[in-house]
Image (cartoon, rainbow, N blue to C red):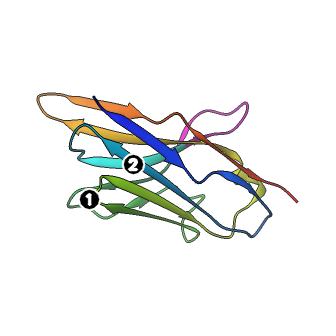
Amino acid sequence: QVQLVESGGGLVQPGGSLRLSCAASGSSFVAMGWYRQAPGKQRELVAVIIINYLPSYADSVKGRFTISRDNSKNTVYLHMNSLKLEDTAVYYCNARVLNSKVTDYWGQGTQVTVSS
């Protein structure tokens, strides 16, 4: 049974940093990434890392966020630096399984609030 467990969210001041983590289990995953959804806005891709490919980032976080993956533990991290007010959102971990079909799994979400 596939499970994704997220942690690391919280309240930070503008310019601060947070590290999110997502531990996935129950399968092997060809891709893992992070999405976020702010109140009243649509969900958007933040960052994704795919096996044998370089990581990709949304333009809004390039140069500030870094995604990394520990393949031995199926854990993905999102290092967030220089946080801005507009980074406030619920962040969701995503993990993709590719066998005979593509299946996406989601974490429960972790709240990140940037406020002074």
Q: Residue at x 23, y 31 (%)?
A: 102
Within the magenta stretch, is there residue 43? Answer: yes
- Residue 86 image position (x, y, % from top left): 73, 52
User: Which quadrant is the N terminus positioned in?
Assistant: top left
Element carrying mark 1: loop
Answer above or below: position of 1 versus 21.
above
User: Magenta residues: mostly which secondary structure?
Assistant: loop
Task: Give the magenta part as a residue range.
Answer: 36-45
Residue 110 appears left or right of 10: left
Circle 1 crowding by C-alpha within 10 Å: few under 14, some 14–19, many from 20:
few
Q: Residue at x 51, y 43 (%)?
A: 35
Residue 8: name its quadrant.
Answer: bottom right
Residue at which label 2 appears: 23
Q: Is residue 77 left or right of residue 32?
A: right
Residue 9 visible at all:
yes
Q: Are marks 1 and 2 in contact (CB under 8 Å)?
A: no
Q: Is residue 63 above or below residue 18?
A: below
Circle nearer the N terminus (1, 2)? 2
- In the displayed orientation, state which residue is furthest to the right: 116
Give the amino acid type for the residue marked by disc 1 in the picture.
Asn
Could you tell me residue 6's position as x and y percent?
50, 45
Residue 14, horizontal then vertical, whole percent: 79, 65
**Residue 45 visible in the current orientation:** no
In which image quadrant can residue 3 be found? top left
Say if 115 sits above or below 92 in the image: below
Task: Judge left or right: residue 51 versus residue 17.
Answer: left
* Mark 2 neighbour density, 10 Å: few (under 14) some (14–19) many (20 or more): some
Quote the CA–CA distance across marks 1 and 2.
10 Å
Q: Report the residue marked by disc 1.
A: 71
**Residue kind at label 2, given as amino acid type:** Ala
